[in-house]
Image: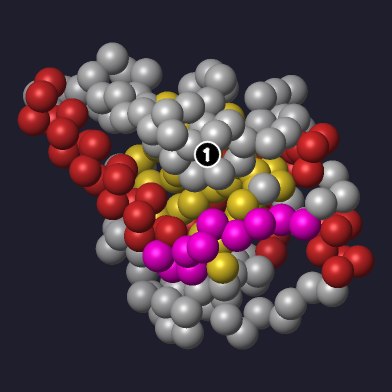
Amino acid sequence: MTINSLYIYDRHCICVYYQDWHRTRRPKVAAEGGIYPGVSRSMHPSAPQLGADAASSTAYTNPRNTLQSTSGVVVAINNELSSPRTQAQTVGTNETSTGLPFDEEAKLVYGVILSLKNMVKKLSGRDEQFTCYRTSSYKLHVFETMSGYRFVMLSDAGAESLRFVLRQIYAGPFIEHVVSNPLIRMDSRERGVDNEAFRMAVDRMVRNMPSFA
């Protein structure tokens, strides 16, 4: 199984955190003012750009972005997209761009989640939860907290449910390094989750998973 990327959205539907691992098609840097500072250094307009050597040693690789639900209620499939390249196939090659700035990509991901969640409620009632969906290229997993934060993870299409991983990220690093941190304003509408300890803790947790490829 390949874990691709993680998005965290606040109660105002704004992406406040982004991190990726295996990604072959990366978004472009966000437009000026498109995302909060601290969401992602590599996607922020003012972030320093890595050199070719540094990028090759530190860059993550992820499959492309597409969306299916394993709840048995909502399934969205796009068979026109080719399957993502594996990590082994991308070693030594340049990453390609999705053609979208990161701020636009983040809005699209959230918009699809919101639309499918509303569709599930209308088709199956309010007791039905939207937790994931799958396409031919990737699988999207969602975990929503009682406080309105949404944790979204993209993996390869054949992955099992990763909702428990998102729950662990919330109950562990997020509570410890973000919620319990007096230096972070949770509802500031000014900055993302600008916390290096949280970013490192999430990276360790994901990389130590037996299913991490």
Q: Quadrant of the C terminus?
A: top right
Which residue is depicted at the point 84% across and 74% down?
51
Residue 101 falls within the magenta-colored stretch: yes
- Residue in the foreground of this view, choosing between 93 and 142: 93
Q: Is residue 38 visible?
A: no
- Residue in the foreground of this view, choosing between 47 and 151: 47
Snapshot colouring = secondary structure
Q: Is residue 37 visible?
A: yes
The extreme front residue here reads 80
The extreme right residue here reads 53
Q: Quadrant of the N terminus?
A: top right
70 is higher (above) or lower (below) than 146: above
Judging by the rendered image, the residue that carries numbered circle 1 is 154
Question: Residue 117, position in %: x, y?
Answer: 23, 37
Image quarter for residue 172?
A: top right
Which residue is depicted at the point 58% across and 31% down?
83
Residue 54 falls within the magenta-colored stretch: no
Image quarter for residue 43?
A: bottom right
Residue type at mark 1: give it.
Leu
Question: Residue 87, position in %: x, y?
Answer: 76, 37
Question: Residue 140, position in %: x, y?
Answer: 45, 35
Neighbour tally class for label 1: few under 14, some 14-19, many 20 plus, Cα within 10 Å? many
Segment colored magenta? 94-104
* Left or right of 83, for residue 36: left
Question: Residue 136, position in %: x, y?
Answer: 48, 27
213 is higher (above) or lower (below) than 70: below
* Left or right of 121, for residue 59: right
* Left or right of 164, for residue 67: left
70 is higher (above) or lower (below) than 205: above
* Left or right of 62, for residue 9: left
